[in-house]
Image: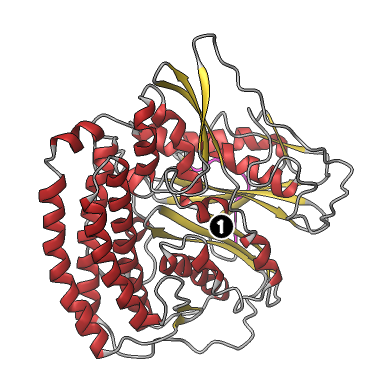
Amino acid sequence: MMPDLGWERGSDDLPRAHLPPERLPSGVAALRQAGFDYLICLSGVDRGEARQVVYHLRDTARHREVALYVDVPSRREEVPSLTDQFRAADWPEREVYDLFGVRFAGHPDLRRILLPETFLGHPLRKDYREDDPEVAPEGEPELPAAPDEMWINVGPQHPSTHGVFRMLLKLSGETVEGCRPCIGYLHRGFEKLAERRDYVQYQPYPDRWDYLAAMNNEHAYVGAVERLMQLEVPRRAEYLRVLATELNRVASHLLWLGTFLLDLGAMSPFLYTFREREMIMELFNELSGARMTYNYLRIGGAAHDLTPELARQIRAFLPYFHRRLAEYEALISDNEIFLARVRGVGLLPPDEALNRGASGPLLRASGVDWDLRRDRPYGAYPELSFQVATASTWDLHGRYLVRLAEMRESCRLVEQVLDGLPEGPHRAKVPVRVRPPAGDTYFAVESPRGELGVFLIGDGTDHAWRLKIRAPSFMNLMSLEPMLQGHLAADAIAILGSIDILLGEVDR
């Protein structure tokens, strides 16, 4: 039974309720008792006359989703923190405070997260100004340590920390007792840019969120715009999107596999995985005219159709890649050194993974059988057949097995697309000036790193009023601290690498 919170249907038919701040904790507690065990997204919105915090929640067992809207009528008002109910609220609440100035009462560590402590003001406010009298520069919090403990700094140099990322490790001898991740070195203001570019002009920017999975980013953005417009995309275009995003999943997992094994000291697989990834980059170059930032998916479809010659090249690649995957397994899977480094390391139990907002291979390797392509299907996926890979070991080994299986399933999906590609146009007729009706929607895709969502608010003009990026790397990184605790410092980089973060997506 759903608790009675005064539900109504929004423009995207999602059940939603408006709550005053004081009713938020009890309302969320009632939803948790009703089975809503996952905080999908937490967004800040400046409505002009007031601020608003929007919560998207999911019942993973019954595949239900709801949205809660909490108005913050005064600049000085606070919203109760949800960190005692969902650990996944930790960083998103800090982000809303950082970018909008909304304070969360009861948050254990409310300070800036993407911007430097000396930054003045809150830049996603519509009335932003640098001389905001309510803002005072903050300092870094103290790092308490017992006499037999010490803090060491790792990063933010690249590539050992998988991007411009810094983590402070609290050590007792060689054992990690705590971790404080530090992000924001690559913050580029992509959400603010969406308010300064029209919907069509913004199309190339998603490529740069997660530049290793650009096709998936494009799908999340154009899908959100299309849902707000209630635009029907041609079936052929939906199939082309699956082709592009699944090949991109393989390319991304290949880079993860090579760099992860490099973290463990294995050099040869790194060279082999980049050999196959290079072939996919060449296929993308033929498809879109670019090797990394494609701008291939467009509002209403895709920029170019699939040519017979490119289809032949993709068909020739698939059996070749299956043979290479078998070689990877023969080289890696039974290697005693590899198994000693990954089994029982970096444990993330399923309840912890859900509570911290993990998604993608990280969540499925913790034994949670959830994949948006199957459980919240979009595009052409309902017409295709594939298996969702999971593991029950909760460790680095499980994350390796899941990603290896996902590459096989992605190849199966690409084969089905090539065999069943419908006839028809590859793009719908879309006005030169895209002006979705006023309203808001949340649209998410299963990227190589997990749930990549876009919460989009339109005001009837050709510019977004608000675009919030629900980045899987940002959410997954919150699980780093519990995975590190109790392990040796020598395992820290391998555990970090097993998450498969992309700092462009973390910082945005």
The spot of residue 188 in percent (x, y) is 62, 58
| Vertical order, 57 against 444 (above or below) | above
Between residue 67 and residue 367, name the one nearer to us.
Answer: 367
Q: Does the magenta stretch include residue 107?
A: no
Residue 365 versus residue 319 in the image, above or below: above
In the picture as drawn, the residue positioned furthest to the top comes out as: 147
Q: Residue at x 77, y 55 (%)?
A: 125
Any magenta on residue 6? yes
Q: Can residue 402 be seen in this view?
A: yes
**Residue positioned 31% across, 66% down in the render:** 246
Residue at x-position 41% and y-position 24%: 485
Q: In the rendered view, does 346 fall on the left or right side of 224? A: left
Q: Is residue 457 above or below residue 463?
A: above
Q: What amino acid type should be assigned to the residue bearing mark 1?
A: Ile
Q: Where is residue 479 in the image (x, y as percent from the top left)?
A: 44, 36
Q: What stretch is highlighted in magenta?
A: 1-10
Q: In the rendered image, is residue 19 in sight?
A: no
Q: What x and y, as percent, mark residue 410?
A: 25, 64
Q: Nearer the viewer, residue 148 or 240?
A: 148
Q: Name the residue under label 1.
A: 469
Quadrant position of residue 484: top left
**Magenta stretch mostly in which secondary structure?**
loop
Q: How many numbered marks have been drawn onto this rendered protein structure?
A: 1
Task: State the image quarter where residue 108 is shown.
Answer: top right
Residue density around tag 1, few if under 14, some if 14–19, many if 20 or more, within 10 Å: many
At horizontal 27% and vertical 51% (from top left) the residue drawn is 403
Q: Quadrant where the C terminus lies? A: bottom right
Disc 1 is placed on an element classified as strand
Q: Classify residue 102 by image quadrant.
A: top right
* Viewer-proximal residue among 66 and 428: 428
